[in-house]
Image: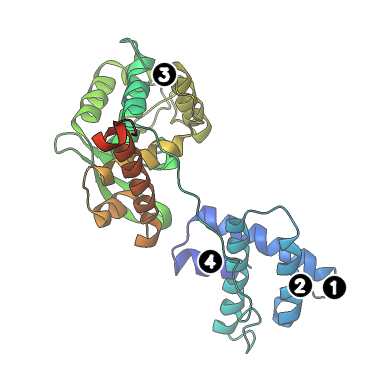
Amino acid sequence: MNGFLNYVGLERGLSPKTQEGYLRDLDQCAAFLAQRGVSDWRSVAGREAALWVQSLSTADYAAASLARKLAALHGIALYLVRERLREDDFAALLTAPKFQRTLPDTLTHEEVERLLAAPSGGDPQALRDKALLELFYSSGLRVTELGTLTIQQVDLEHGFLRVFGKGSKERVIPVGSKATAAITRWLEAGRPYFVKPHTGSELFLSKRGRGLSRIMLWVLVKKYARAAGITKTVKPHLLRHSFATHLLSGGADLRAIQEMLGHTSIATTQIYTAVEPQHLVEQHARFHPRNREPLD
């Protein structure tokens, strides 16, 4: 298992989070196989692996979770062949479950404006929260990327930031003028009040002088969504979805959006092309004059 995890981490570039998921999945599979007298990956038969996959279909797993579990099983089977620990791929005939991608929910432009205006006042906390929400929407960062962002990664003079995303892949993302202005105010008049002797170079700080955790970012986003009167279930990732959808509706190139989001495959980004036509239909129904005229 250690060899396999090192392989997917170093040679395939999978993130530590994905590696942890694979480890949990394969531990689950190993426990299932051990109950049937199989104690070594080198002796797993295809029919035994198929029984585990079949058992998962009766549990309440999301289809995407099932697909990941099967990907982990395929991965270790191929690794064993690659390392010449066995001659055959015992998972070769196992197929991933098909699932329908659900369209991501997004905020409207008006809802975004209300959310970004929710942190009011000039106190240090309001300046911080205003800056992080502006940057969140302006850049489409993942929650972890936002929380671990350092001052050195942000170039306010030229309006961009550098971030290391999944698989430690670096990408450059533009930062809008309003986000730049908000971050500048935070750095000048807000951040100094949060600095403690142990403070590092994180851009956004908690009252204890440390970087913001995922949970803290989650709490802040939900807090200001309530303050803005937004009735949707607002999660941090919703700002990332809104960033991509609004760029697309404004005419941005899909490849450029893919690069900014840090998607490895364009297929992942293409889900936003399904959201946009839906938006166009709604706009047509609402504003086209032939739709507003009463029927004869």
295, 131: nearer the viewer? 295
Neighbours of disc 4 within 10 Å: few (<14), some (14-19), many (20+): some
Residue that numbered label 3 is attached to? 228
Cα–Cα gap, marks 1 and 4: 28 Å
Cα–Cα gap, marks 4 and 2: 27 Å
Q: From the image, state whether disc 4 or disc 2 is nearer to you.
A: 2
Who's the residue at 44% across and 21% down the image?
224
Secondary structure under tag 1 reads loop
* Residue at the bottom extreme, as displayed: 87
Dot 4 or dot 2: first in sequence order is 4
Residue that numbered label 2 is attached to? 51
Neighbours of disc 3 within 10 Å: few (<14), some (14-19), many (20+): some
Q: Does the residue at mark 2 contact the one at mark 1 (Cβ under 8 Å)? A: yes
Q: Amino acid at mark 4?
A: Asn
Residue that numbered label 4 is attached to? 6
Please tell me in which quadrant of the rendered image residue 281 appears: top left
Dot 1 or dot 4: first in sequence order is 4
As drawn, the label of residue 182 is none
Q: From the image, state whether disc 3 or disc 2 is nearer to you.
A: 3
As drawn, the label of residue 36 is 1
Neighbours of disc 1 within 10 Å: few (<14), some (14-19), many (20+): few
Q: Amino acid at mark 3?
A: Ala
Q: From the image, state whether disc 1 or disc 4 is nearer to you.
A: 1
Q: From the image, state whether disc 2 or disc 1 is nearer to you.
A: 2
Horizontal placement of 50 versus 217: left or right? Answer: right
Who's the residue at 39% across and 42% down the image?
241
Who's the residue at 63% across and 63% down the image?
69
Where residue 285 sits in the image (x, y, percent)?
Answer: 33, 38
Dot 4 or dot 3: first in sequence order is 4
Who's the residue at 72% across and 62% down the image?
56
